[in-house]
Amino acid sequence: MCQQVPQLQIIQQQKQQQTTPPNNLLALLHNKCNPSLTQLLQHQLHHTVHSLSVGTTLIRCREHLLLTITNNLKTAFSAILQRSTRPQRKELVEQAATLSAQENVEPACAFIHNTAAKKSISEIDKRLATEFYLRKHVRNKGRRYDYDPIVFAYQADRMPEPIHLKMSGVTPQQAGVYE
């Protein structure tokens, strides 16, 4: 990464001299930087998607999973101990179900985190495969990939003015992120 930071400065200088700049910073990086930077961007994208999916499952699944495991264990234990005539049966079933659920919720959450992360990474790879292929194909031909006209038209038609893509290139605010 240390060797690629000077490349970004050179790219920014070249960018200011161009007459038809690309529509965003990602396009600029894909067009001007070496393929290893593209791999780095894809790797960082995987980390971002992994973190988002794990964070979402961490927030959303633990309590629901604990409740579901507890209820299923209570039902199973009650069915097994239904023949028992002991008066403490209900209390015993509740304690056993709660304790077992609390011990097993963490491995279940870990499994869900892992599955969600793998699925989200494969999904983002599928969605961006055509974009990576198109950029690689254009780069191999020695041309520059300015923008996708379909995406640009979609952005211009449906997004509010302050946030849609513009052909103005990299703003100083965007470039400041990398300095």
Image (cartoon, helix red, strand yellow):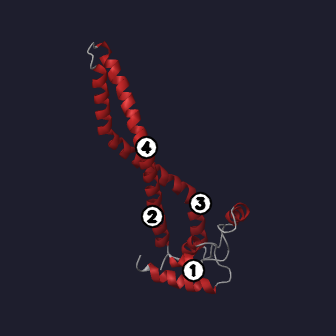
Give me the C-alpha separation between circle 3 and circle 4: 33 Å
Q: Nearer the viewer, residue 2 or 135?
A: 2
Give me the C-alpha separation between circle 2 and circle 4: 26 Å
Give me the C-alpha separation between circle 1 and circle 3: 29 Å
| Residue 8 position in % (x across, y down) | 50, 80
Tell me which amino acid carries mark 1. Answer: Pro
Q: Nearer the viewer, residue 70 or 20?
A: 70
| In this view, 94 is above or below 31 | above
| Residue 139 position in % (x across, y down) | 58, 73
Tell me which amino acid carries mark 3. Answer: Thr
Judge left or right: residue 17 versus residue 73.
right
Q: Quadrant of residue 84?
A: top left
| Residue matched to label 3 | 130
x 29%, y 38%: residue: 103
Tell me which amino acid carries mark 2. Answer: His
| Residue matched to label 1 | 172
Tell me which amino acid carries mark 4. Answer: Cys
The reply to whether discs 2 and 4 touch (Cβ–Cβ < 8 Å) is: no
| Residue 119 position in % (x across, y down) | 47, 49
Viewer-side label of 2, 1:
1
| Residue matched to label 2 | 43
The reply to whether discs 1 and 3 touch (Cβ–Cβ < 8 Å) is: no
**Upstream in sequence: badge 1 or badge 3:** 3
Q: Secondary structure at mark 1?
A: helix
Q: Secondary structure at mark 3?
A: helix
Instruction: Rate crowding at label 3 as few (under 14), some (14 to 19) or many (20 or more) other CA atoms within 10 Å.
Output: few
| In this view, 82 is above or below 133 | above
x 54%, y 54%: residue: 126
| Residue matched to label 4 | 61
